[in-house]
Image (spheres, helix red, strand yellow):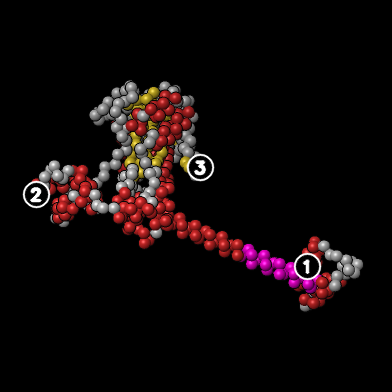
Amino acid sequence: MAKGARYTPEFRAKAVGLLAESRSSYSSETNAISAVAKDPGIAPESLRRWRDQSDATVAEETRQSAEDAMAELRRLRAEDAELRRANEILTTASAFFRGRARPDTALMAAYVDGHESRFKVGPIRGVLSESLDCGFLTPRGCRMFRTRPVSRMRAGHGAPARDILQIHSDFFMAVYGYGKMHAQLVAQGRDPAGVGRGQVMNIMRELGIRGVRRGRTPVTTEPAKGTGGRPDPVDGRFEACAPDRLHVAGIAYVRMANGSFGYTAFVADVYARRIVGWACAMAVNTQELPLRALEQAVSWAASRGGADGLIRHGGHGAQCTGTVCTTRVMGYGMLPSTGTVGDSCDNAMAESADGAYRTELVWRRTPFADLKDLELATFRWVSWRGLEAPAPVPGLQDTGSGGNRVLSTSSGTSRLTVREEQKSGHFTMVTTATVELCMG
């Protein structure tokens, strides 16, 4: 290139790149620079200067990249610390304000006083204001509450509180709840008009004492006020002449490792004696759980000819007799059915499936860790019941194995072919059945 010509940045970059590639072929850096600069007519010092500038640029970019990475790491650590603090605040507050739609001002102030040194007032206010629908006590409100005179009602709690603590200190009377505690106060001479049951309950709540329980009885279904006009074509006779003629549905509860309860909804085909739909959840206060099991049962029936005319028999729980569930059942062409109240045969076959579920799975293993663990175990149990378990109907002999099951009866042979499919992320059972009758 002519002397004094201006070299473009692209040309300089190519020259520096060629020098880097040729460096290993020469004994020294100087020889490499001289050899590379000779062909295009570049001054060796110019190439050396370009190399130094390129190295400086690379070093600056590396340093800037490292600084950006450190800044991002600091930001993520700060965000993680903020999330951890918010989670700790919510954890402590959930136990503090549990069971109250609107936390009492005194309770909120007591929470701030007890956790101010750990979390500070600002973060507590910010986190709980977003979490509680009714908002949280402001710093100004907290200061006003601390300086406010004691109310007449709270001042009247002093003497009853001392008596309650004295009664609660007794080993046997420490089991009293607010009802028996109120009766004990009256027995000791307290005026029932001066100390009511509600006041005793509030005082015990403020003192943090409570009676003992024999154990919470899980409620899987909330009894509905009526059957919603459902007929009872089953009438206690759980039998069908063909598949997809009668399904029974129920909900079972399962104890979890953390002390809570999980719930499993089942739908069973009476003729096939198999689970054709199921779903698991950690709450049962909505109609979503039985609807998910219903969708699986409808898919199973659709693969065999449809659900038109199928009878779906359930219990008296509000989840199964609600308007949403009833509308969905009738929308699929199915007939909703509910048995009589107080009848031992109300939903006997679904309760039998519940008992088998507990005996064969739940009671034979350690408590489930979470919902995913419960779903996986339930899926495996349902698959085993449908594919490998012995025939549950008396008079039938299982002469096959695996997915192809041959059941021999006095009137002939029926062949039931079952196929199972598992998809990632969730479980889907695909069932195909073929019935062959060989009359004897």
Vertical comparison of 219 with 184: above or below: above
Residue 188's disc is 2
State whether residue 39 appears in this view. Answer: no
Query: Pointer 1 and pointer 2: residues touching (CB < 8 Å)?
Result: no
| Three-letter code, disc 2 | Gln
- How many neighbours does mark 2 have within 10 angstroms: few (below 14), some (14-19), or many (20 or more)? few
**What span is colored magenta in the figure?**
47-66
Tell which circle, 1 or 2, labels the residue nearer the N-terminal end. Answer: 1
Tell which circle, 3 or 2, labels the residue nearer the N-terminal end. Answer: 2
Question: Between marks 1 and 2, how big is the CA–CA gap?
Answer: 99 Å
Viewer-proximal residue among 171 and 29: 171
- How many neighbours does mark 3 have within 10 angstroms: few (below 14), some (14-19), or many (20 or more)? few
Q: Position of residue 10 (x, y in %)?
A: 80, 61
Q: Position of residue 383 (x, y in %)?
A: 42, 40
Q: Which residue is mark 1?
A: 16
What residue is shown at x 78% (from left), y 69% (from top)?
Answer: 50
Assign the C terminus to one quadrant of the image. Answer: top left
| Three-letter code, disc 1 | Val
Element carrying mark 1: helix
Element carrying mark 2: loop
Q: Position of residue 257 (x, y in %)?
A: 34, 51
Residue 423's disc is 3
What residue is shown at x 77% (from left), y 78% (from top)?
Answer: 28
**Magenta segment main secondary structure:** helix
- How many neighbours does mark 1 have within 10 angstroms: few (below 14), some (14-19), or many (20 or more)? many
What residue is shown at x 72% (from left), y 69% (from top)?
Answer: 55
Q: Nearer the viewer, mark 1 or mark 3?
A: 1
